[in-house]
Image: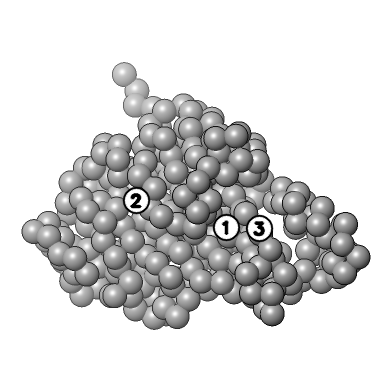
Amino acid sequence: MPRTANTRPVPLGSRGGLALVLAGLILAMALPAAAHEYWLAPSRYLPTPNRPIELSALAGTGFRGERKPFAPAHCARLTVHAIRTLDLTPVAREGGFTWARFAPSDSGGEMFAFESDFTPITLPAATFDPYLVTEGLDGPLAARANDPKLTRSPGRERFRRCAKAWVSGGDVTRATTPMGLPLEIVPAAPPGQGEQLALRVLWQGQPLSGALVRVWHTPTAKDESPTDPESRDSLAVAWQQRTDAQGTVTLPTQQAGEWLVSTVHMVPSSDSNTADWESTWASLTFQRRRAVAR
């Protein structure tokens, strides 16, 4: 792992100092039909310098989910963009529900990013086709309807995850610089600072038009910390819209609380022996603070 005067790896559970530690990043990905969404969940989005933030991952329906342990064999990438971009995979620990413990050394903010490899799954047509409808995957749905070999056949898919989480800070470039994920949600400004947030969806680094972007929202606790994602009730989509020709949507973020933005892109599988389709799921989590009374 790269080291600077401001960051160094330390054993999980150590105290004091400016520390960045990966105790484990995940990959135990729930099946798309049962648990569509997958996101990174920091213990808080409003950092205090030198006080560690714990990072975990969840999969669920909507914004309520189950914590997932780290499976290093399926982790393609785990990085954090802070003062510099650090590769966290060399210090990953298998089986941990706490992925990372990171003590910010300044107030610039941090963007965490995770990419998995592919996992195959086969779903019956009665499940697969409605899933394509829900996620706005019109191309694959039309292809199945127009191909006699695919119509009413099981959906043979392999899927992967590309998740990001923004921990608030004032360095615009840390929030807005693409991380190089295959499918990525890139904010045009630090998330959570305004009543609107423009986002770009990039596929292989290029704007993706027509992608359905879906958004969930849940209030935070009185002290601005996230509520328990395993017990809260936040299943309804708060907002959704397709990207324009430039791959952009503008999300209304007037409400304080925690936000989950998600999109999925599906293409014919490059490994036809394993699957007919391959999907990539991208997410971005962030928080908008409550207005300060004057």
| Quadrant of the image containing the N terminus | bottom left
Which is nearer the eye, 3 or 104?
3
Disc 1 designates what residue? Answer: 281
Label 3 crowd (10 A; few <14 / some 14-19 / many >=20): some
Q: Which of marks 1 and 3 is in front?
A: 3
Helix, strand or loop for disc 3: strand
Question: Which of the 4 image quarters holds residue 23?
Answer: bottom left
Q: Position of residue 212 (x, y in %)?
A: 65, 44
Q: Is residue 267 left or right of residue 169?
A: right
Residue 40 versus residue 119 in the image, above or below:
above
Residue in the picture at 47% in, 50% down: 205
Three-letter amino acid code at disc 2?
Met
Residue 239: tell me if it is visible: no
Q: Is residue 54 left or right of residue 62?
A: left
Residue in the picture at 75% in, 51% down: 139
- Which numbered disc, 1 or 2, marks the residue that appears first in the sequence? 2
Disc 3 designates what residue? Answer: 266
Question: Which of the 4 image quarters holds residue 36?
Answer: bottom right
| Quadrant of the image containing the C terminus | top left
Three-letter amino acid code at disc 1?
Trp
Which residue of the protein is positioned furthest toward the left in this rendering? 5
Q: Position of residue 241 (x, y in %)?
A: 64, 37
Residue in the picture at 49% in, 68% down: 116
Q: Where is residue 77 in the image (x, y as percent from the top left)?
A: 40, 67
Q: Nearer the viewer, mark 3 or mark 2?
A: 3
Q: Which mark is residue 111?
A: 2
Q: Residue 219 carries which label?
A: none
In space, the residues marked 1 and 2 are separated at their CA atoms by 18 Å
Three-letter amino acid code at disc 3?
Met
Helix, strand or loop for disc 2: strand
In space, the residues marked 3 and 2 are separated at their CA atoms by 25 Å
